Image (spheres, coloured by chain):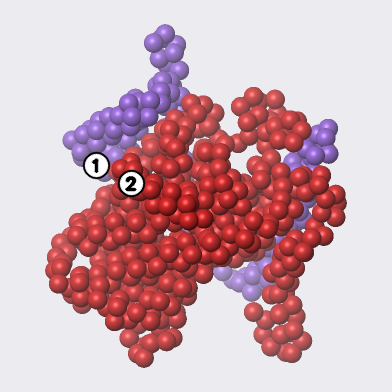
Chain colours: A red, B purple
Amino acid sequence: MLENVVQALTNFTNIWIWLWIMGGVISGLIIGVLPGIGSVTGLALFLPFTFKLQPMEALPLMVSLASVGFTGGAITAILLGIPGETSSIPTTFDGYPMTKKGQGARAIGAAVMGSLLGGVAAAFLALAMMFAVLPMVMAVTSMDMVFVILIGLAFICVLGKGSMIKGLISGGVGILISSVGLAVLTGEPRFTFGIAFLYDGIHIIPVALGMFAVPPMVDLALQGGGSTITTGEVIIMGMKDVWEGAKDVFRHWGLWLRSTIIGYIFGVIPGVGASVAVFVAYGQAKQTSKHPELFGTGIVEGVIAPESCDNAKEAGSLLTTLALGIPGSLTGAMYLGAMLMMGLIPGPEMITKHMDLSLTLLIVVAVSNIIAAGICFALAPHMAMIARIPGRVLVPTILVFIFAGCFAYRGYFEDIIVMVIFSVIGVAARRFGYNLGGFAIGYILGGLFENYLFISLQIGGPLFFLRPIALFLIFILIAFFTYSPLKNAFKIKRGEPKI
Amino acid sequence: MRKLRGSSYSLILVIVVMLAFIGLSLRLVYFASKLLPQLMGGIVLLLAVIALAREIKAGHSLEEATVTTSETGVGEKNSAEAGKYSGIAAWIIGFFLSIYVVGFMIATLLFVGAYMKRHGSKWPATVITAVIFTGIIYAVFNLAFKADLYKGQLLMWLDF
């Protein structure tokens, strides 16, 4: 175990890993600042570039990009009142009023320090947890993995946005799409219609780009060709005020700690998502405050809570993805997709055979947060100007990158056709309230699920689930689906309104 | 006749696709090949039917409650929205077709330039951005990643 830690630390003596992290941090901050383009879109855009990279290059790039995207989102949320990411919305409640009161620099200082400490603390917590969960994960067999995947999928589909049924439909359709191509176990072509291109299955790159990169561009195009920022004022920030904001985090360390823990826990639970976590963190900050009436008028606690929570979530999500192979969030789904493309199977195998890589990635979360904080402290007002790039420039240039990336990965023109089809599906699915996260995770885990299911049937027969861990997981699954209806039934019986 | 909502149409589409999936999987030879599609297809089909029934039921109650709501306003809003989506779809399909015909480099130049100009950019900014961006695409994909971007049917017909 110690040798894995040493190996992980040794990886940081390589200059290239630092360059990939720097690339990821800068890209993450820019993507975070740009309204309408979130970390998930950023990761989908970078996915095709992984074809020339080694896992030790591509994964640090992706992890650092996603780890700091939220920090970039906070800058426009505070200085311009426009959240770069959905999860930065609560930051606008108090961050932007602080700017209007002339305390923008202090809010930036608090947001960046909160993000930095939240991200770093959660990364170390995840590192410690990695060793704690190791014996448990090693006890999980293929027969249990069937239910681990089902639980992960159920959490994501049910706890995600939209209705539970549509969430489950999305997950199921994702699994079905993954079944297109030659069946791994029999070699029989499924749903290929004699088209040779489909024998390899529908590749993740066109699916990810179509579902997650094109729809945000369509949304951006719907807003017209102008810049989302219309104000012309130049934001001047004094470093003294920035440091004052940074010190505020230490003054409110209890709030920071609670928000970090909330972010970490929400990150570990698959499917809950950053947008829910930050609202919970903001809510608890208001509830536990001595002056809750001031929230929304521009107080620093309203900035510290969501920002600490936001960055803490990423390490928790990464831990679940690495240890169980269940993505804690959509960014986790993108890591998972990249890992599978590189021949790495997240889950027990990942943290036993590739422990050093797993530890390295958790350290990358901490390192990238530190680098991002340095950049933001120095350049925050200039970074906010990036948000002034008008839609008429962003939409065509990013679309070209998406199309070129889609083609470059394998050199198949058919991949572009598949991407366009999935773009239509992605736009329609968002419009009609389907759960894209559920779809993505169903699609990515579908192949693994089928493999585990057949291995289990071959080893244990139809009653393969009669094992303590599998039965426990089935119990969780049943409890998860029956809790809410049973609670409602009891409430109706007692004459109370149902939830 | 009662009009269905877009979401209901999407569920009908899911039901049709699932029936096709199940039907096609029945033709598969091996049990191991057909188990997952049939199992998942069946579950999704069932869920989609339940969701559709719920939506239709909810639509009933909504209609009963808001009989007097003006349908013209909603119709106009929907058609305006559909018009916007069609416009964007036309840009994307246009770019896709231009890649097919003239290849990535020329299509990029044309697409970026045309989109910017159509959305109010001035000529110098449009031309400079389109040229620089085409250069960036060439540098990143062709030079740095050694990925030969699609050259287009036109160049192939002309034997380049």
Residue B121 disc label: 1
Which residue is located at x 71 percent, y 35 percent? A184
Give the SS element for disc 2.
loop
x and y percentages locating residue A435 in the rendered image: 58, 57
Query: How far apart in space, not on screen, are marks 1 and 2 (Cα)?
Result: 47 Å
Location of residue B65 in the rendering, given as x and y in whole percent from the top left corner: 64, 74
Kindly identify the residue that appears in the image at 36 percent across and 91 percent down: A290
Q: Is residue B142 above or below residue A488?
A: above
Q: Position of residue A175 (x, y in %)?
A: 67, 47
The secondary structure type at the circle numbered 1 is: loop
Which amino acid lies under the numbered mark 2 shown in the image of this protein? Thr
Subunit that carries the residue with mark 1: B
The quarter in which the C terminus of chain A is drawn is bottom right
Question: Can you tell which quarter of the image residue A311 is in?
Answer: bottom left
Q: Is residue A297 left or right of residue A451?
A: left
Q: Is residue A328 left or right of residue B140?
A: right
The residue closer to the viewer here, B32 or A481, is: B32
Q: Amino acid at mark 1?
A: Ser
The relative height of residue A93 versus residue B94 in the rendered view (above or below) is below
Please give the name of the residue rendered at 43% of the width and 49% of the height, measured from the top-left corner: A7
Q: Chain of mark 2?
A: A
- Label 1 Cα neighbours within 10 Å, binned few <14 / some 14-19 / many ≥20: some
In which quarter of the view is residue A425 placed? top right
Q: From what the image shows, is residue B13 above or below residue A134?
A: above
The residue to which callout 2 is attached is A13
Tell me, for residue A55, which label it has, or none.
Answer: none
- 1 or 2: mark nearer the eye: 2
Horizontal and vertical percent for residue A44? 46, 45
Residue A443 visible within the image = yes
Apparent side of residue A489 relative to residue A9 in the rendered image (left or right): right
Residue at 29% x, 81% y: name it.
A251
